[in-house]
Image (cartoon, rainbow, N blue to C red):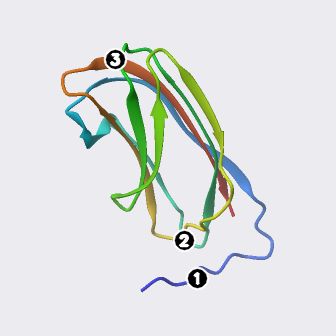
Amino acid sequence: PAHRCAVRADRHPVHRCVQAVLSFVAHGLDDFRAFDPPLRYPVPEGASAQCVYFRGGNESDALICVVLTCDDEPMRLFPLGARQALHVPLRITEELLTDRTLELHVAAPAGIEGTVVVDLGILEL
């Protein structure tokens, strides 16, 4: 069962980023896989978090999809066109509680290899 975390009154919001430039080999658009090394953000004890933006760039010649998961469940899909970039300001609709883990994965047509730039902005409360 979900529980509300206690956020200290003296705690100030902290901006966090999950960002990297990574190579990938795809296994299919319906088979998303974690990046290597994994791009994870665990919500710290006593805090909550909110995603505020996603930016990404795809240097491959194919459409790819960056998948934001929360505790291994897909949460958001960010399609990146061939040799395209994307900036998505995210409305704050979810409050992610203590002990939740965000992770970025990639999906693309099987056999596609490429490099992707990702930047996920998070506000830690």
x and y, in percent, of residue 56 in the image: 54, 29
Q: Which residue is mark 2?
A: 97
Give the residue at x 69% y 64%: 125
How crowded pointer 3 is (Cα within 10 Å; few <14, some 14-19, many 20+) is rated as some
Q: Element under label 1?
A: loop
- Side of 117 where 74 appears, left or right: left
Which amino acid type corresponds to the residue marked 1 in the rendered image? Arg
Q: Which mark is residue 4?
A: 1
Q: Amino acid at mark 3?
A: Gly
Q: Nearer the viewer, residue 87 or 41?
A: 87
CA–CA distance in space, label 1 to label 2: 7 Å
Query: Which dot marks residue 110?
Result: none
Give residue 37's quadrant in the image. top left
102 left or right, relative to 93: left
Q: Earlier in the sequence, mark 3 or mark 2?
A: 2
Marks 1 and 3, the one that precedes in the sequence = 1
Spatial CA span between label 1 and label 3:
40 Å
